[in-house]
Amino acid sequence: MPDIALVIMARYPQPGTTKTRLARIIGDEETIHLYCAFLTDLAQRFAVNPLCDLYLAYTPVEADYAAFMATLAPSLGQSMRFFPQQGAGLGERLHNAFHWMYERGYRRTILIGSDSPHIDGDIVAHAQEALDKADVVLGPADDGGYYLIAMRRPHDVFRDIPMSTNQVLQMTIELALRQGLRVCTLKTLFDIDDLPDLARLAQLLRADSSLAPATAARLATMKEFV
């Protein structure tokens, strides 16, 4: 089997817990439809890749995520694997996901969020290559966080870092450097947290819908972006 794992950190979409900042503006139902489109695009892009195995780390733990994803991407069910996120906060869940993959024999693990359906295969390939020399690879998000983190071993670069702030990336780099780890950063992307982010994505997909076809199709039905 490949020794590289690509893990999407995902949740089971439910009212009140899915993209809440966006849901306050466009409503829970539309937000859930959009989030499902994000997951569809990510699965279709990364499920069939001979160089890495695709996993979805999901929350809440009681969700039947395999059955849920089978409704979004029926032909890809055998190409995806699933495990529940474990931990009290996002940092702990990320750290545990790296441990989970390392214990199963993967020597390179790449974690991405589910909030950037336009992440392309080149970015993941660059992360794989960067791990030849770096201990920690980060894909900066332009809000000060990161949309990707990759490591060969489960280093703790998450402890005491307040997630969902504009200092996450910088604090993560500083913590890694204090441990003597080599850090590499990739190109900066944006993720989708609120309506301006979604408008930016809609503009991007109008120019090239192939970046996220299911998301582009969903946005085309929304009055805000028609």
Image: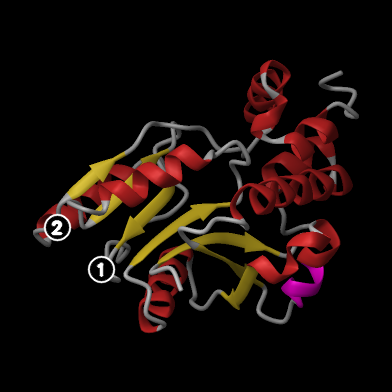
Q: Residues within 10 Å of mark 2 (few under 14, many from 20)?
A: some
Q: Residue at x 49, y 75 (%)?
A: 88
Q: Residue at x 56, y 61 (%)?
A: 9
Q: Residue at x 59, y 52 (%)?
A: 46
Q: Residues within 10 Å of mark 1 (few under 14, many from 20)?
A: some
Q: Is residue 13 magenta?
A: no
Name the residue type under label 2. Leu
Residue 167: image location, x then y, percent: 34, 43
- Residue 24 vs residue 47, the one in the foreground: 47
- Residue 64 vs residue 29, the one in the foreground: 64
Name the residue type under label 1. His
Q: Quadrant of residue 83?
A: bottom right
Residue 181: image location, x then y, percent: 14, 57
Residue linked to disc 2? 181
Residues in magenta, as a range? 64-68
Is there CB contact under 8 Å for labels 2 and 1? yes
Instruction: State the CA–CA distance, disc 2 to disc 1.
Output: 9 Å
